[in-house]
Amino acid sequence: MNKEKETKAKPKKDKKLDGLQAKIVKLETQNNEYYDKLLRFKAEFENYKKRMIKEQSLAVKYAAESIIHRILPIVDDLDRALIAISDSQDPAKIIEGVKLTHQDIKKLLDEHLVHEIDPHGKPFNPEEHEAMMTIDSSDHEDNHVVEVLQKGYKLDGKVVRPARVSICKKND
């Protein structure tokens, strides 16, 4: 009778063991599939990053292309002005040509959201101005811009070149 119980118990244990082994095999297969997917996603992501880096570098490389196309006619105008200077005796024509070229450049800058910083007579602002010298003057307010030595510019509100200025410093 003891042997009978053992033989009945063994098949139950064997069935249970077989079921667990089958489950292990299934889980290992599933694990391998997930691992393969992970490796593919990782490779795809690496390729995506490389593609984005390449596209960014091309975008940076060719970002200036449109503005260069707009600047080249202005350079052509300046070339013609230089030729006109040597050929012409009429200074009024030369001055007019330079003024027109200057207007073209200002218009181009304005179209690209580049604007002058006008600090004259305003309080010194270190974010927009670079103090090149100080002047002791009773005609101007202390720490205000007296003279603009070089214009400054902003690109869409961001300072790309601070204005170089002289400021009033009163010595009391």
Image (cartoon, rainbow, N blue to C red):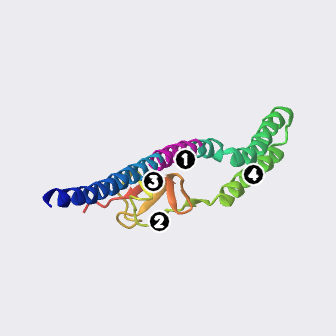
CA–CA distance between discs 4 and 3?
25 Å
The number of numbered badges drawn on the structure is 4
Q: Nearer the viewer, residue 21 or 55?
A: 21
* x and y, in percent, of residue 124 in the image: 40, 62
Q: Amino acid at mark 1?
A: Tyr
CA–CA distance between discs 1 and 2?
53 Å
Contact flag, marks 1 and 4 (Cβ < 8 Å) = no
Other-residue count near label 4 (Cα within 10 Å), few / some / many at <14 / 14–19 / ≥20: few
CA–CA distance between discs 3 and 2?
11 Å
Other-residue count near label 3 (Cα within 10 Å), few / some / many at <14 / 14–19 / ≥20: many
Dot 3 or dot 2, earlier in sequence? 2
Q: Amino acid at mark 2?
A: Gly
Other-residue count near label 1 (Cα within 10 Å), few / some / many at <14 / 14–19 / ≥20: few
Marker disc for residue 127: none
Q: Amino acid at mark 3?
A: Val
Marker disc for residue 165: 3
Report the residue marked by disc 2: 121
Callout 1: helix, strand or loop? helix
Quadrant housing residue 128: bottom left
Above or below, 60 relative to 4:
above
Which residues are the magenta region? 37-54
Above or below, 29 relative to 15:
above
Tell whether 99 sits left or right of 40. Answer: right
Of circles 1 and 3, the one toward us is 1
Report the residue marked by disc 1: 48
